[in-house]
Amino acid sequence: MNKDESIQKLKKIVKPYVKNEEALENINENTDFINDLNINSANLVDVILDVEEVFDIEIDADSMEKMRDVQSALMVIEEKLAAK
């Protein structure tokens, strides 16, 4: 799966939690989940649970802390997929 496909998958995952639709339409590697998409921290946990389910990976607490923006999330996802 290439980076664009991963971003599109991530976009579908975060869509229900996003408060800023315009930012979602322009999602890219530099998009911050909290500051740009206005996802609150409680919903961020839901996003991570959904990422685990969609990508069939387990995300530990340390990795969870890193997932604040799209680029970091993609790095964690790739790392976890590679470790399978």
Image (cartoon, rainbow, N blue to C red):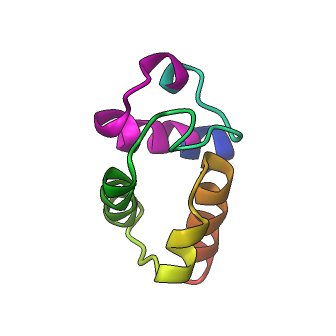
Q: Where is residue 5 in the image (x, y as percent from the top left)?
A: 57, 41
- Residue 9 percent across, percent down from the top left: 46, 43
Q: Is residue 35 above or below residue 58?
A: above
Image quadrant where residue 77 sits: bottom right
Q: Residue furthest top?
A: 22
Q: Where is residue 2 in the image (x, y as percent from the top left)?
A: 66, 47
Q: Main secondary structure of the magenta part?
A: helix
Q: Residue at x 30, y 57 (%)?
A: 46
Q: Does the magenta stretch include residue 81?
A: no
- Please tell me which residue lies in front, 1 or 35: 35
Total tally of numbered discs in the picture: 0
What residue sits 41% from the left and 41% below the top? 39
Which residue is at 46% across, 37% downward?
A: 11
Residue drawn 50% across and 71% down?
64
On screen, residue 59 above or below 32:
below
Where does the image place residue 17, in percent across and percent down from the top left? Answer: 32, 39
Task: Decide if residue 68 is on the left or right side of residue 20.
Answer: right
Quarter of the image where one finds residue 72: bottom right
Residue 46's place in the image compared with 37, above or below, is below
Magenta span: 7-23
Is residue 22 in the magenta section? yes
